Image (cartoon, coloured by chain):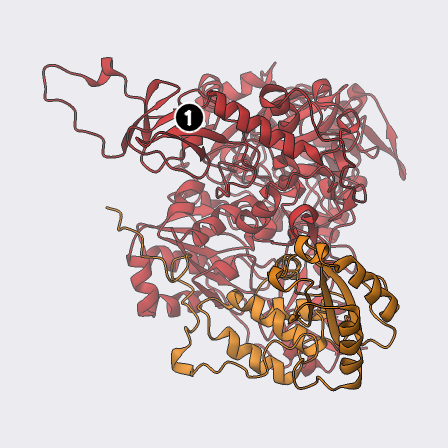
Amino acid sequence: MTTIDPDTTADDTVEAPPVDPNAVNITVNGVPHVARKGQLVIEAAADAGEYIPRFCYHERMTSVGKCRMCLVECDTGRGPAVTVSCMVPVAPDMKVDTQSETTKRMQEGVLELLLANHPLDCPVCDKGGECPLQDQTLSNGPGESRYVEEKRHYEKPIAISDIVLLDRERCILCDRCTRFADEVAGDPLIHFNGRGNNTHITTYPDEPFSSYFSGNTVQICPVGALTAKPYRFKARPWDLSQQESTCTTCAVGCRTVVQSSRDEVLRYMGVDSEPVNHGWLCDRGRFNFESVKSPDRVLQPLVRDGDQLQPSSWNAALAAAAALITEATAAGGANSIAVLGGARGSNEDAFAWARLGHEVIGTPNVYAQMGDGLPAGLLGQPRATIDQAAHAATIVLLGPDLKEELPVLYLRLREAAEKRWSRIIEFTPKRTGLSPYAWRTIGYEPGTQVAAVQQALADPAIAAQIASGDVVVVAGRANLAESSAATVAALRELLAAVPSALVLPAFRRGNVVGALQVGMRPRPGGLDTRSTLQAAADGKIECLVLVGADPLADFPDTDLARRGLAGARRIIAVDSFLTASSSLAHVVLAASAYTEKSGTTTNIEGRVSTLARQVTPAGNSRADWMIAGELALALGGDLGYDTVDDITADIATLVDGYAEVTIEALAASTDGVVAGVPSAIDPMNVVPVDLPDRNAYDFRLVVSRTMYDQATGTANSPSLAHLPRGSAVHLHPLDIERVGTTAGTEVKVIGPRATVVFAVVADESVLRGTAWVPFNNPGPNVGDLIDCFAAVNDVRIENI
Amino acid sequence: MSRLNEANVILAKEIIGRYPKARSATIPLLHLSQQQNGYITSEAMVHIGELVGATSAEILGTATFYEMFKFEPVGKYLVNICGTMSCQLLGADELMHHAEARLGVKAGGTTADGLFTLEHAECQAACTEAPNMQVNYRHCHRMTTAAFDQLIDDLAAGRLDGEIPPHGTLARVRQQIPADKAAGVASLDAPAQPAWMPAPEATS
């Protein structure tokens, strides 16, 4: 909004302020208003306080002028003319009239026509109560319809994907969902079909709308045509209570609204946060609320009795946990205790657990990562915000497939490339979701990142592109089947060549950045996850504390995770579910889940935003920070926290970079507060990579995550649980021929440690000479083939 | 099986080369596939999507907008009888009834021998020649029931093969565009707007 307030701009002592070249003077309903050059009338009127009704117009997508609801009268000196306000930019001295008789009559006419074929099933429609068509019919529509003929009929809801259903009778053909699919998500799998009165939205037969972002179409549908399975017939909008929160499914930190009814979470909606998600959410983040109310939640503390985990009281369980820690300290000293995890919770949870581990227990072995990211030192690099990345002249990707791991960041960077603000240079061991939009995609065989980067930097075209403006490097772990050393070295190489480059760390897990920054990282001499598990396997860990960590599922080297958990003498788990790892624990402390606890979270750019407590924690579960506080008391320490706000305040005082993240600042800003880059984080050391030669018949293994896998939140959400694509070995079609097999048949994948049988999938996105297997997917476990101490992992593929 | 055949794939690639953006060739390729099979098959739409870089849903959506693309088999001869005002006043209804009786199918149907598809049509822009009808979009003026029977007999006997090609035939002489006159494929880095639009003003 650019209204110029005469009191603040007119200054008699100096010359008149320079004329703003972008200001356009218009009047809206007779009231003068200063609009921006190029601004659409519908937006300028909104700035001036006049809401023009609309269905098809959406501020995050191209205007199409399809619904005609936003017709108003505009006079540019030639007399009032009927104008589609979402298509026409403001002009100097334009007189906009949103209230005239003609405007009113036109809007009534448009609504009468839209309603001609719209079924009057509002009482059973999920949109009823929050429906723009319903609302605007009330505010702008005619009182009655003259249409008495039979309405158009279609088969009532048809499933256009596993999650989304389409009721074509209700559709008003506004082009929002199809535009979203095409422009924003890049998955134009739904389209207008037919013509005239027969126009309707469809997918291609047998080709569902399987976009990772399909849920957004349900949110932006201005009628009840698109509904999502998890919410259908669950509640009426007026029964919902809601709070703004932040999604912690991945580390992008999309702003959401959590809606519940009768103490049950029923829906998440995206909130338009300018610096982060622009209102969009991925389907995994949008629909995994189902796991919160899963019947499989751990509802009370459990204590092991022989082979069984028996329900227990909190007092008994905390006493048992404290006893395990005391015994462990007595047996092997504090250094024999390790705390893994903490990325699932809030900053406050992580801070309390970091203090419990480091101060009360006194161990340096605390780590929030599961051996599947880059070293925490990445957070010490000059950090880019998501906005800086999405507006950089050059975006260099040296990390995972963002579409799979940080989906909304993918949307932001895709938009940057599609709108030609930025060029993407991508280094990757496998073509990614962003490859079609990248200016250059440079494939590398695992372990050879440094050479790939050096070679690219020597290319004059790439060098010129990098020199043309600001550079942001999105850095992360692209391959779980190789050590992070080569990626770190390649990143160092890039940063040495482009010293002004900023880094956006592509850490994946919900609050891993927050957990690492507030202290869940090893103190000097402490062990990281890999060393912890190795030490445990060697019998040197007396007590292992898993704070929402599931090494058996998430640590790339399953064999080491298995040996580590078997070798740890005592295991305490703080978890919401009995996972493969937590079910091995001696004591399980029931943790409350997302939406059941308040606090703050930190996203990849360091933005701290709030989490809402919208429902009562399931059963007797408690927030992680409370458990840490109680456990500290049981161990004779005291963290001194009574409320979560005490911890937020303590983080602002004590944590490097969080000085400005005060409760007041968080309350004042809807977009959160960006924390500073920690100064005292361990340096990101380059470890020399000893790359073995690849045997000509071997395949170098590439393992990465997919959006839907067997993660706890996905597996316990019935709408998502069946969506993982399943474990299989993906090979380039020419390599399939070379192996002498065919797609669909099963082959033996032979590593130095194990042989695993996978089905073969032909996949042109896989580089020749490499084999890609999705991680943690249903089916044979690829983790058995990964040696986390090896620079790279080679496998042989044989027919059975 | 009903994808574009080898010869047509070569032709398709040549057609795509005439446009700055591959997906501009969607409609010509739909015509090509209709010429090949007499109608547009599902497989052909998937194939065209692959060729022009669009999803099958986009091809289907584009194709279904147009009345002249058929998605189910039609006869060798598509008979469209105009039923709009001038023709109706001058006996289109009687002509349609007669045609239905003569061909043994209702409007919209195809004869068992696969030779004729009968359709009702809206105004064919020949009101001065009413009642008008078309066979494979060739006009037949001032039709009478007798003329209709004669026409059907002639078509069935193959006496009009030279004048009226089978349904789907777009042109018997294919347009030849020299390679140097083709627009060529636009650079991926070019601004995302039609080539004929002036370059946007340089922003300071």
Q: Which chain is orange?
A: B
| Quadrant of the rendering where the N terminus of chain B is positioned | bottom right
Asked if A362 appears above or below A580 in the picture, the reply is above
How many callouts does the rendering have?
1
Please provide percent x and percent y for residue A103. 49, 25
The residue at 26%/47% (across/down) is: B203
Q: Quadrant of residue A116?
A: top right
Find disc 1 in the rendering and name its residue: A45
Please provide percent x and percent y for residue B192. 42, 57
Q: Nearer the viewer, residue A621 or A422?
A: A422
Q: Residues within 10 Å of mark 1 (few under 14, many from 20)?
A: many
Asked if A165 appears above or below B15 in the picture, the reply is above
Asked if B151 appears above or below A466 in the picture, the reply is below
Q: Quadrant of residue A110?
A: top right
Colour in which the image shows chain A: red
The residue at 42%/82% (across/down) is: B179
Q: Quadrant of residue B51?
A: bottom right
Output the chain of dot 1: A
